[in-house]
Image: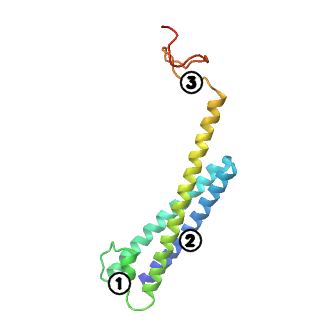
Amino acid sequence: MAIHELSALLWRERELLDVLTFKLEEEQLLLTSGKSRWLPHGTREVEQVLGHLAKASLARTIEAGVVAEAWGLPTDASLAQLAAAAPEGAWAEVLSAHLAALIRQTSLIKELRDSNEQYLRTAVRSTQESLADLRPAAAGTYNSHGKTGESAGSRIFDRQF
């Protein structure tokens, strides 16, 4: 029966979202601890989980279309619509529970993603500031010849005048 397969696919998707949450938290630990050398490995693992998640989501969408058609709904019916149209029995509750869990998980993932992005922006800004302190000439302004000035003189007036 298609509904059993749909429920199994929803469980698989939830498991992958748990793994994604773990990988994002792992990335966050790397960012906050300054262990940036491992960041490419963490990012690659996040990308791998996202790839698996995309495949699982596609399979779930296809199976949800089969269930929707069997229940007299359009094949692009959402999970909420499937739960509302579920025949008498436990399926409405099961689908609603899956939907609530998916919403919670995606909300947490969004928060982690935004937080990690903020940590990355801070790290980039800090690196740029550190590099500017090491090479003040590179961070200087341009002179009339299109080169950065090395002098500590005025940066407002061109000395050629």
Name the residue: 61% across, 18% down: 152
What's the amino acid at mark 1? Ala
Does dot 1 land on a helix, a strand or a loop? helix
Colour scheme of the rendered structure: rainbow
Other-residue count near label 2 (Cα within 10 Å), few / some / many at <14 / 14–19 / ≥20: few
Task: Give residue 15's mark.
Answer: 2
Is disc 3 in contact with disc 2, using a CB cutoff of under 8 Å? no
Q: CA distance from mark 2 to mark 1?
A: 25 Å
> Is residue 47 something that shows in the picture?
no
Other residues around mark 1 within 10 Å, as few (<14) / some (14–19) / many (≥20): some
**Does dot 2 land on a helix, a strand or a loop?**
helix
Residue at (60% x, 36% y) in the render = 128
Residue 65: image tag = none
Sequence-wise, the earlier of marks 2 and 1 is: 2
Of residues 146 and 1, the one drawn nearer to the viewer in this rendering: 146
Occupied quadrant, residue 62:
bottom left
Q: Would residue 116 be seen by someone viewing this image from the given angle?
A: yes
- Residue under pointer 3: 140
From mark 3 to mark 2, how far is it between C-alphas? 52 Å
Q: Which residue is mark 1?
A: 85
Instruction: Give the image location of residue 30, x and y in percent.
Output: 66, 53
Vertical position of residue 159 compared to residue 130: above or below: above
Instruction: Quarter of the image for the N terminus: give it.
Output: bottom left
Q: Residue at x 59, y 25 (%)?
A: 138
Who comes first in sequence, dot 1 or dot 3? Answer: 1
In the picture provided, is 44 more to the left or to the right than 94?
A: right
